[in-house]
């Protein structure tokens, strides 16, 4: 009786706000023509149309009503034991294409002596099933098990993080946000230490692992609440809220992160390069994406460079959104770390990317929810043909390029080169000297006048280039306007931010790579 009274009060409050939108769904429920969950879904459709002003209040009211009524599966969200939320339950899926794609990738890389590791990200449904409400079924862990067993049968290296992060309900409560499907800072750090340990024990016994010590990191937690991607669908009264948190190193860092597709570049400390703190300090529960604190969002490609890293290795990680807080931690360990999100990256296949960029290690980490997605179609069917060191006579040989400062924000220098579509080229730079102004990075790109855009683009980290030199390989796209001459442009700073900067490139060589 109490539940019914509470429910009617909630509906009455909503009706006072805008009875026009709730009238038909409520009447259908009262007449017995629809179930409770159907009524709430119909109300949600009405206010999601954009006509309902207090939408956030309605989400909260609906969530409160569902919680009072004892509904554990509401609006596509599951209230797990321990009062934490899970997203859409995963049906049984075919893992065959993923098994084939990952196995072929691993075997191809092995031929070129490039180590590969498949990492199984944890899952919010505990591995032992102890936090899933009775009567509900989910196949996420079974799908991950089938894929792992098949890969292990083919001698593919695997690391299953569920053992440490989501084995049971207690671990899920400890290592995940309550209202988001992603892991929290503690869960991320467990993954960081396990991955670094595997690389050291399996591949590089002399790997410097000092930075994987939690005592070298400072934990920050804010008191203002946030709703994760799951909580936004059910409101703050269904399962509560979370608190923004992150870690920053106690040791000195100087690094950069670039997002080539968006022409973004961040540099300086770990905090500057990897965290967008405005997402942590916002008090907007429904409109702020708190998880965008890490890297600012999902990007097709993110390139981390770190001249102070203890290990001079080039790492490539194929990922989904679980990697975002983790890639920042890993970027403290290696001079170059690149992440690819195959749901967003479409410039070339994964095999082609590896062939062109020649990483020292390839890692792949996805959540069980990703297994079976169309991202596997971006692997590419052909074995990576690693681009060799053979080259023709340099088109530019150890040149010096001096770009004087102007007020232009697109100041660059170039050479009279003919770059052919479909050909691969390599740029090497021995040093980059900023003699006037300030910039931690310089843009380099291939510009197509016909398409009016950069068709190849990178950012050279000035500090890393001056310490180890810079090398960039690119392939001119085949699909260019007929008879178009593209130009290779070297900017005095970040494209769009070059005003007042004078830059000298030294030891600059451009050659076609066979």
Image: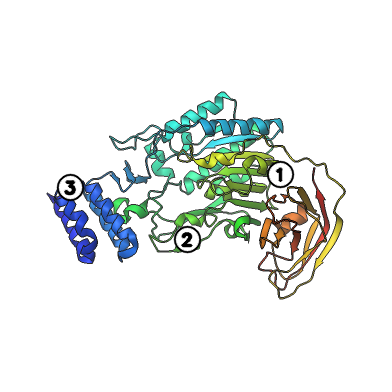
Q: Residues within 10 Å of mark 1 (few under 14, many from 20)?
A: many
In front of the other: 148 or 127: 148
Rendering quarter of residue 435 = bottom right
Pointer 3 or 2: first along the chain: 3
Q: Which mark is residue 33?
A: 3
Please identify, in this view, whether the residue under mark 1 or under mark 2 is nearer the observer. 1
Name the residue: 57% across, 58% down: 271
Describe residue 195's horizontal placement relative to residue 461 as left or right. Answer: left
The quadrant of the picture occupied by the C terminus is: top right
Front residue of 187 and 155: 155
Residue, far left: 1
In the picture as drawn, the residue positioned furthest to the front comes out as 482
| SS for dot 1 | helix
Q: Position of residue 19 (x, y in %)?
A: 21, 63
Asked if the residue under mark 2 is in contact with the one under mark 3, i.e. CB atoms within 8 Å, the reply is: no
For the residues labelled 1 and 2, say whether their Cβ atoms are less than 8 Å apart: no
Question: Disc 1 or disc 3, which is closer to the eye?
Answer: 3
Q: CA distance from mark 1 to mark 2?
A: 35 Å
Secondary structure type for disc 2: helix
Mark 3 or 2, which is nearer the eye? Answer: 3
Of residues 449 and 120, the one nearer the viewer is 449
Picture residue at 50% right of the left edge, 48% below the top: 321
The residue depicted at 40 percent of the width and 64 percent of the height is 283
When the figure is inspected, residue 16 is found, relative to residue 148, above or below; the finding is: below
Task: Using the numbered discs, state the Cα–Cα distance from disc 3 to disc 2 in whole angstroms.
Answer: 43 Å
Q: Residues within 10 Å of mark 2 (few under 14, many from 20)?
A: some
Q: Which residue is mark 2?
A: 279
Q: Is residue 358 visible?
A: no
Camera-nearest residue between 275 and 485? 485
Instruction: Give the residue number, with chain letter if any, for mark 1.
Output: 356
| Residue 301 on image: x %, y % | 60, 51
Name of the residue lying farthest toward the bottom? 407
């Amino acid at each position: 009786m109490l539940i019914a009274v509470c429910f009617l009060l909630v509906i009455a409050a909503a009706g006072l706000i805008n009875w026009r939108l709730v009238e038909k769904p409520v009447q259908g429920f009262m007449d017995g023509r629809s179930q409770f969950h159907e009524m709430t879904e119909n109300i949600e459709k009405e206010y999601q149309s954009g006509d309902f002003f207090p939408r956030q209040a309605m989400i909260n009211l609906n969530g409160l009503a569902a919680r009072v009524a004892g509904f554990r599966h509401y609006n596509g969200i599951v209230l797990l034991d321990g009062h934490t939320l899970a997203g859409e339950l995963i049906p049984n899926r075919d893992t065959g294409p993923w098994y084939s794609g990952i196995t072929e990738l691993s075997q191809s890389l092995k031929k070129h002596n490039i180590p590969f590791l498949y990492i199984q990200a944890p899952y919010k449904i505990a591995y032992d099933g102890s936090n899933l409400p009775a009567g509900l079924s989910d196949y996420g862990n079974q799908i991950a098990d089938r894929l792992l067993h098949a890969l292990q049968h083919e001698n593919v290296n695997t690391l299953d993080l569920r053992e440490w992060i989501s084995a049971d309900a207690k671990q899920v409560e400890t290592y995940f946000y309550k209202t988001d499907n992603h892991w929290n800072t503690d869960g991320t750090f467990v993954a960081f230490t396990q991955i670094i340990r595997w690389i050291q024990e399996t591949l590089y016994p002399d790997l410097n692992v000092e930075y994987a010590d939690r005592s070298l990191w400072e934990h920050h937690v804010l008191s203002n609440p946030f709703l994760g991607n799951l909580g936004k669908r059910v409101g703050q009264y269904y399962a509560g809220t979370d608190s923004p948190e992150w870690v920053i190193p106690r040791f000195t860092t100087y690094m950069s992160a670039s997002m080539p597709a968006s022409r973004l570049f961040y540099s300086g400390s770990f905090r500057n390069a990897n965290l967008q703190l405005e997402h942590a300090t916002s008090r907007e529960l429904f409109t702020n994406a708190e998880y965008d604190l890490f890297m600012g969002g999902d990007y097709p490609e993110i390139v981390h460079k770190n001249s102070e890293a203890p290990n001079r290795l080039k790492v490539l990680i194929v990922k989904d959104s679980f990697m975002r807080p983790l890639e920042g931690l890993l970027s403290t360990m290696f001079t170059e770390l690149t992440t690819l999100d195959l749901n967003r990256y479409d410039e070339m296949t994964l095999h082609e990317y590896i062939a062109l960029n020649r990483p020292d290690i390839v890692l792949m980490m996805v959540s069980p929810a990703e297994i079976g997605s169309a991202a596997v179609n971006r692997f590419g069917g052909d074995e990576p043909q690693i681009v060799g060191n053979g080259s023709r006579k340099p088109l530019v040989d150890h040149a010096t390029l001096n770009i004087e400062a102007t007020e232009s924000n697109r100041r660059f220098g170039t050479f009279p080169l003919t770059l052919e579509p479909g050909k691969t080229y390599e740029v090497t730079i021995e040093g980059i000297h900023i003699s006037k102004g300030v910039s931690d990075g310089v843009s380099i790109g291939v510009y197509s006048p016909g398409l009016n855009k950069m068709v190849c683009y990178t950012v050279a980290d000035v500090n890393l280039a001056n310490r180890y030199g810079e090398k960039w390989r690119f392939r001119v796209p085949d699909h260019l306007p007929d008879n178009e001459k593209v130009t290779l442009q070297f900017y005095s700073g970040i494209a769009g931010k070059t005003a007042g900067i004078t830059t000298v490139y030294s030891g600059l060589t451009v050659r076609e790579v066979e």
